[in-house]
Amino acid sequence: MTHEELSARLKACGIVCGEDVPPKLLTYHAMLMDWNTRMDLTAVTEEAEMMDRHYVDSLMALTVPGLLPQTGTLIDVGTGAGFPGLPLAIALPGVQVTLLDAQQKRLNFLKAVVGELGLTNVTLVHARAEDGARNPAHREKYDVAVARAVASLPVLAEYLLPYVKVGGKMICWKGPALMDELPQGRKAAFLLGGKAQEPIPVSLPGRDWQHLLLPITKNAKTARQYPRKAGTPGKQPLGASAPSGETSAKSPKK
């Protein structure tokens, strides 16, 4: 895909970004394809689908007015090959972006991309989501926490909300399964000091994918016992028997 073709695709999807963004995304893509021959970074290898599913989809949050800040701090939890955090860092140079992942080999790849692109607004952190959120250097330090294709909504809430400042938000990229996960996810968010907003549908022209963005605002500090020890959120998701409510809970667990 050429610079001109990618620029046209971003424009067709309603994504407004700087002229330097398409060439940086293409460099990122070339490095991903190269590294993917030696390690498992993505199962999607057809170029047009990769561009839409990874880079364009990551930037679709830019089409929602007010969803993302132009300055401040953002953490991508379980970033994998860098999605959605690294495309957002490229498109939002005023935002300090932290990419967190449990696998060092993925971070080695991301370090190479960040160095090649000369990005100065990206920090890499090697940690499991639960462990990083208990670290005072990261706990409730971010304006926005994001994740894409990581876990079910109740699990994502426990992974992300402990990183978010009161007054900030988490945003997750989800498919149609979100609607089934939403009732339990709302309860989990409540326990963690958050309140789930209405899902925001985003569509890519020419694709029949059902993609949704879900913001969860942080209204109160997350109780100390959350997140629970590594592995527990996935095995015992919050919210199954939790009380629902319209205001955030300041009580138990971190």
Image: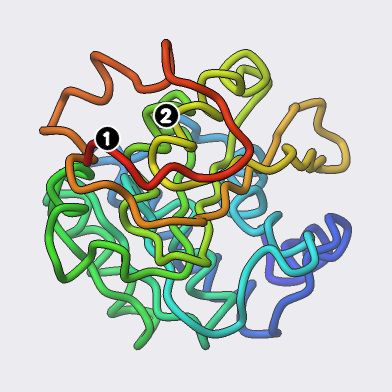
Q: Residue at x 50, y 46 (%)?
A: 194
Residue receiving disc 1: 40
Measured in 3D between alpha carbons, the distance from the residue under mark 1 to the one under mark 2, in whole angstroms, is: 8 Å
Q: Where is residue 112? Give x, y as percent.
A: 24, 69
Q: Where is residue 46? Give x, y as percent.
A: 57, 35
Label 2: which secondary element: loop
Asked if marks 1 and 2 touch (Cβ < 8 Å), the reply is yes
Q: Nearer the viewer, residue 12 or 47?
A: 12
Left or right side of 206 for 238: left
Figure quadrant of residue 8: bottom right
Q: Nearer the viewer, residue 36 or 98?
A: 98
Q: State the mark number for residue 43.
A: 2
Q: Where is residue 86? Give x, y as percent.
A: 44, 64
Q: Is residue 53 visible?
A: no
Label 1: which secondary element: loop
Identify residue type, mark 2: Ala
Q: Is residue 182 visible?
A: yes
Q: State the mark number for residue 126.
A: none
Identify residue type, mark 1: Asp
Q: Is residue 14 above or below residue 54?
A: below
